[in-house]
Amino acid sequence: MRYFEDVAVGDRFTGGSLTVEAVEIVAYAEKFDPQPFHLDPDAAKNTLFRGLAASGWHTAGLTMRMIVGSDAELAGGYIGMGVDQISWPRPTRPGDLLRIEMEILEARRSAKRPDQGILRVKTTTFNQKDEVVQTMIANLLAPGRPD
């Protein structure tokens, strides 16, 4: 497990991989994002996506799963403090094999809680062709090493 003191600006970590299944794309969409290009492969052919595509929010959830399983492994888990930026430059498709790369952009001690730090982290999600399907910049609360 890594504490705040164990990471520095520029550190990089990796995580993944997981395969995206069509049935998972549809199940997520039915519950949370019921649009034709997420629900029906035939209907999706006539949309901007030209085929079934995962909801961006589904991709974000898959990314979170890989973050938790990454080699960064923050002590106490990942406590999100918000996302500054998220984008989906290309769709996540059935059969995609996803992986992530994380980079520490900023690291600062908390002014209110000096036993904790705040990390600004860029996470990029790639498919099996090394194409970017999501980028996210988030702020994480990291516990400091206990005395």
Image (cartoon, rainbow, N blue to C red):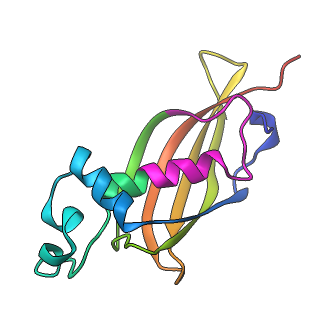
Q: Residue at x 42, y 43 (%)?
A: 83
Residue 89 lies in what quarter of the image? bottom left
Residue 46 lies in what quarter of the image? bottom left
Task: Work out whether 106 lies above or below 101.
Answer: above
Residue at the front extreme, as displayed:
23
Is 68 a magenta residue? yes
Q: Is residue 38 left or right of residue 75?
A: left
Task: Work out whether 21 lies above or below 121.
Answer: below
Residue 99 lies in what quarter of the image? bottom right
Q: Which quadrant would the N terminus be assigned to in this image?
A: top right
Residue 11 in the image: state x and y as whole percent: 73, 56
Count of number-bearing discs? 0
Residue 32 in the image: state x and y as whole percent: 24, 45
Q: Which quadrant would the C terminus be assigned to in this image?
A: top right
Q: Residue at x 70, y 19 (%)?
A: 114
Residue 64 in the image: state x and y as whole percent: 52, 48
Q: Is residue 63 left or right of residue 45?
A: right
Residue 134 in the image: state x and y as whole percent: 42, 64
Q: Nearer the viewer, residue 65 or 24?
A: 24
Is 2 a magenta residue? no
Q: Nearer the viewer, residue 96 or 121?
A: 96
Q: Residue at x 46, y 66 (%)?
A: 20
Q: Is residue 51 left or right of residue 35?
A: right
Task: Work out whether 66 lies above or below 90.
Answer: above
Q: Nearer the viewer, residue 37 or 21?
A: 21
Task: Work out whether 7 lies above or below 3.
Answer: below
Q: Nearer the viewer, residue 104 or 43?
A: 43
| Highlighted range, magenta | 61-80
Q: Residue at x 64, y 16 (%)?
A: 113
